[in-house]
Amino acid sequence: YRSRLRTALKSVRAAIAGGKSAEVKSSLGETVSLIDKMAGKGIIHDNAAGRYKSRLAKRLSAAK
């Protein structure tokens, strides 16, 4: 699960940096879902999950 999370985060960050808005929208939803699932299972802490989601949203808004 951690490996899937890291890969998903990298792909979203790359899409944001590349300005690929269609790719960002699809991968962002999947990544946020994965983050929530991991927090629910106790693999990552709830605050860490919130931090990941917040930082992704912050990058997305800064890129627009």
Image (spheres, helix red, strand yellow):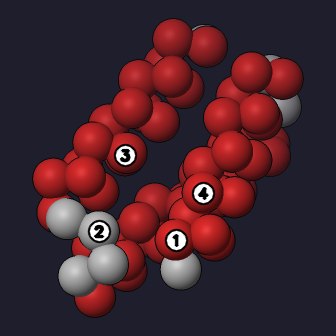
**Which residue is painted at 41% across and 66% down in the image?**
35
Q: Is residue 28 positioned above or below 5 on the image?
A: above
Tell me whether circle 4 and circle 1 mark residues in contact (CB < 8 Å): yes
Q: Does 15 sit left or right of 7 as displayed?
A: right
Give the quarter of the image for residue 13.
top right
Question: To which residue does mark 4 refer?
Answer: 6
Q: Is residue 25 visible?
A: no
Give the quarter of the image for residue 24.
top right
Tell me whether circle 4 and circle 2 mark residues in contact (CB < 8 Å): no
First of labels 1, 2 by sequence position: 1
Q: Is residue 19 visible?
A: yes
Spatial separation of the CA atoms under disc 4 and disc 3: 13 Å
Question: To which residue does mark 2 refer?
Answer: 44
First of labels 4, 2 by sequence position: 4
Give amino acid for label 3. Answer: Lys
**Residue 59 x, y percent position in the rendering:** 51, 22
Viewer-closest of 48 and 50: 48
Q: Does 4 sit left or right of 31 as displayed?
A: right
Spatial separation of the CA atoms under disc 1 and disc 2: 9 Å
Query: For residue 53, which numbered disc appears in the image?
Result: 3
Viewer-closest of 19 and 55: 55
Tell me whether circle 1 and circle 2 mark residues in contact (CB < 8 Å): yes
Q: Does 31 sit left or right of 42 as displayed?
A: right
